[in-house]
Image (tube, helix red, strand yellow):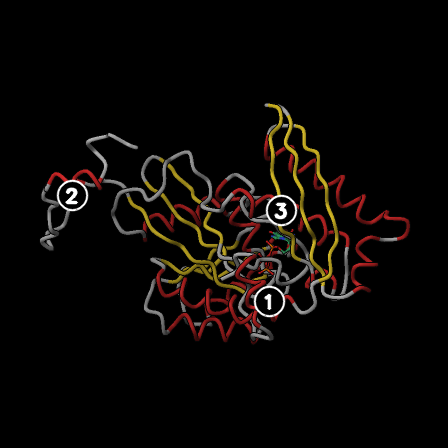
């Protein structure tokens, strides 16, 4: 039994009074010089929200791919500098819900946006401003949080094309703060960051300064495996795959053993993911192992199985188990 006099149970047994909150602020805000807050990303699928999150954080906290709807969970990336801490909330792209999975994703987008200190609207500069962006802008207008717009992928645009997307973005009339950036090359990201910091409220940091993300390790590892599936599959298969870590062992300091399942929705998708003679799943496994080794700093033995779970995207118990809420 824990004999520590500090434990709450002992406090109660000894009759120690626990102070009741009086409604007085616990911290004197005038004495705080740092700024901190939550910046939620809104944008169409594929606009580059996850790439921008990683670029700002300076570490890979979110997987990226050229397939729309890669991001399924709200991922918090944490960026700390001397004067400020930004908690970047990388969200799924805004889209019409099609099933339980996308329904949950969109509910999460709405609740995270409501709770944010700043909304950062990311526009895919290569595609220009479209009806999807106008819809997102109309939603942001109702939120009453400061909005900043990043026009991304300007590395793919000539100057006149960049100017015309910037003008179209300003005409959305949701923000006057429009920044041309390339999340891929890093161009324009620093001025955007400096501006976001000026809009944050004063306050203490939310996360320890060496933390990059609030994502549980097993979720990040599963995502790194899914990223390799996304790189190699097409049409409906990337959307039908989810990866779950079943076991993680460290038998030696320099070796991690991981057992993971890749869920698909039908036997034909299973066939595609395994590939002729098992070639596809071997390639996924080899590439994923390298990413896992980089993340964990140990050798990795990866046992990756493909399993069919029909309609997992409409199955609430499966989504709960996969921690998609
Ligand atoms: N050329 C170029 N490509 C980019 C840039 N930013 C992102 N991309 C690419 O665009 C694709 C989509 O990027 P993501 O970061 O996954 O996009 P997302 O907005 O998070 O997508 P969802 O998860 O679908 O919401 C990937 O292939 C990225 O490499 C950029 O600044 N320039």
* Disc 2 and disc 3 in contact, CB within 8 angstroms: no
In this rendering, position of residue 207 left or right of residue 97: left
Q: Is residue 15 above or below residue 25?
A: above
On screen, residue 266 versus residue 223, left or right, reads right
Please name the residue shown 59% across and 69% down the image: 315
Q: CA distance from mark 1 to mark 3?
A: 42 Å
Q: Decide which of tag 2 and tag 1 comes sooner along the chain.
A: 2
SS at mark 3 in the image: strand
Other residues around mark 3 within 10 Å, as few (<14) / some (14–19) / many (≥20): few
Disc 1 Cβ-to-ligand 1 distance below 8 Å: no
| Residue 199: image location, x then y, percent | 32, 53
Which mark, residue 246? 3
Identify the mark nearer the N-term, 2 or 3: 2
Residue at (64, 66) in percent of width and height:
312
Residue under label 1, please give it. 128
Residue named by callout 2: 12
In front: label 2 or label 3? 2
């Amino acid at each position: 039994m824990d004999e520590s006099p500090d434990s709450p149970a002992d406090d109660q047994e000894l009759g120690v009074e626990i102070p009741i909150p009086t409604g007085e602020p616990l911290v004197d805000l005038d004495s705080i010089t740092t700024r901190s807050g939550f910046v939620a990303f809104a944008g169409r699928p594929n606009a580059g929200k996850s790439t921008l999150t990683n670029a700002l954080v300076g570490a890979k906290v979110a997987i990226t791919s050229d397939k729309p709807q890669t991001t399924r969970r709200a991922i918090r990336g944490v960026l700390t500098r001397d004067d400020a801490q930004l908690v970047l909330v990388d969200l799924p792209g805004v889209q019409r819900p099609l099933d339980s999975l996308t329904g949950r994703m969109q509910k999460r987008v709405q609740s995270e946006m409501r709770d944010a200190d700043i909304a950062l609207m990311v526009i895919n500069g290569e595609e220009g401003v479209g009806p999807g962006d106008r819809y997102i802008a109309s939603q942001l207008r109702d939120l009453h949080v400061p909005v900043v717009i990043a026009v991304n992928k300007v590395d793919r645009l000539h100057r006149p094309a960049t100017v015309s997307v910037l003008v179209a973005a300003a005409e959305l009339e949701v923000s006057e703060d429009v920044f041309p950036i390339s999340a891929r090359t890093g161009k324009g990201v620093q001025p955007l960051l400096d501006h976001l910091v000026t809009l944050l409220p004063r306050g203490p940091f939310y996360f320890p300064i060496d933390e990059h993300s609030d994502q549980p390790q097993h979720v990040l590892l599963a995502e790194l495996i899914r990223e390799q599936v996304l790189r190699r599959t097409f049409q409906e298969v990337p959307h039908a795959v989810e990866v779950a870590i079943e076991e993680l062992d460290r038998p030696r300091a320099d070796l991690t053993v991981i057992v993971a399942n890749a869920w698909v929705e039908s036997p034909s998708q299973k066939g595609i993911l395994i590939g002729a003679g098992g070639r596809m799943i071997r390639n996924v496994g080899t590439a994923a192992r390298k990413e896992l080794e980089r993340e964990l700093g140990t050798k990795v033995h990866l046992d990756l199985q493909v399993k069919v779970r029909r309609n997992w995207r409409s199955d609430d118990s499966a989504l709960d188990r996969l921690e998609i809420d």
